[in-house]
Amino acid sequence: MNEHNPITVRLDEMVQVWKKNVQPHHTLIRWMLKPEDHRMYEGFCRLEASPHGKLDNLFVFFYTPFSNVKTYSHALLQNWLHEYDDPQQQKLLAGAGINNTWDVQVFRKAVEENDYKLCDELLPAMIQSYKQFVDRPDAEFVFSVLPKQMSSPVQFHQWLQQWMELIKPPAARLLVFDHVNGNFWGNVFEQYNDYTVTLTHDLRMQEAIRQIATAGAATDPYAFFRKCMFEMGEAANKKNRSLLGEWGDKAVESGKKTGDKSLLATAYITYAGMLFNFRDHERINELLDTGIRLCKQEIAGGNESLKPMLLQYYTYKGADCQIQKERKEALQWFMKAGDEAVAFGLTNQAVSAYYKAWVFASYKNWQEEKIHACRQALQLTARLTEEEIQASEYPFMAYEYVQYKQQEEDELAALVSDKMTAAYGAGWKKTVEDLKQNYTKKKIREANAGEPA
């Protein structure tokens, strides 16, 4: 393993935090990290459960889903037995010099009979039995979990309390993951604070990602391009227009040097997008127009991969016109994105573009334009699967159009109504009303928080 790899460096730091804070009397431990750092918790557990672990502990690690307090111990025992029965695991044990057989009869019987209460009591016994089996009876044992589904945090909290009340062999520990701002398991850690420990560490993952993405930037033009992207983002966050310009120009030059037209198109649109905060409309339009010409040339030459990017350019043009209060032009760009998406056969993108036009026209009370955008989207009904309808903005337009046409015979409204019934059932209108309400609430939350809810 490369000791200078940014991820390895951080795993080593986690090991040091563990060594410094975990004491023999601790029976419940948590890594309390940012939610997005769960991958590092997973990496730490997997490393320590492997022959390459840095701690002198006996680790096991399971993703066993948590459904409720009653069945979780049973699920863990079942998972552990399944792992032991795996021929691959048997081979690994033999490779480690463990050739004897683990006597799991009592645990297997409890699992097969679904004796949930007994499984709770047998979990510590299984830990002790495993330590004997691998001939490390005095080893400090860590049972680490990261449930891949968590149906009830409240019940998981109860299960942790239950773990604390069990009679356990010496040096038997449970390790869990918690969120810094969530503090989901805080109460149980406070209640048993003599036997629990919380490990925290700033893993600086953005910095790590950046280091990995830009490694070799001095000689690799693609790595240098990624470096430009990070630097542009940083300059934009600092509201430093001149620094953004400097790195934006470098990104464009770097994109040109690679000869990769997709990369160059990405440079133009990313640079333009970051300039929106500075309202530098002249430069924004230069970049967008250049990018549009590039995309069109490439598509004409057979490079179809740039079709979605061209649609994105049209949407950016519309957004820029919107900011400048050039409202009719903004609407034209949104409609153009939809029309071109239809021509390209990109139906989902077409629905999305027409939806933007529809929302914009609704906002401006342009009834004729609004109905036109709506009809253009709904003309695509036959091309959309039920799954695509449920994953798109189609239902909002469908609802409004069917309501608008309810007093008259309309072939399109009937087709749309049939499609919505197939996707959501006979009560689809009520479903869409609920969706609209939740969607509006989500948008309000996003606007208030300045970030996605």
Image: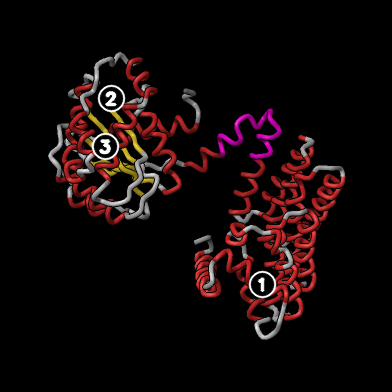
Query: Circle 3 is placed at which residue position?
Result: 77
Q: Secondary structure at mark 3?
A: helix
Report the magenta residues as a range: 210-227
- Residue 145 horizontal side relative to residue 188, left or right: right
Q: Secondary structure at mark 2?
A: loop
Residue at the spot 75% in from the left edge and 49% down from the top edge: 268
Q: Secondary structure at mark 1?
A: helix
Q: Position of residue 180 (x, y in %)?
A: 36, 51
CB-based contact (under 8 Å), mark 1 and mark 2: no
Answer with the quarter of the image where residue 17 lies. Answer: top left
Residue 448 visible in this rendered orientation of the protein: no
The residue nearer to you, when weighing 16 against 375, is 375
CB-based contact (under 8 Å), mark 3 and mark 2: no
- The three-letter code of the residue at mark 2 reads Asp
**Callout 1: 10 Å neighbours few (<14), some, many (20+)?**
some
Q: Position of residue 380 (x, y in %)?
A: 72, 63
Work out whether 230 lies above or below 16.
below
Query: Circle 1 is placed at which residue position?
Result: 359
Query: Circle 2 is placed at which residue position?
Result: 56
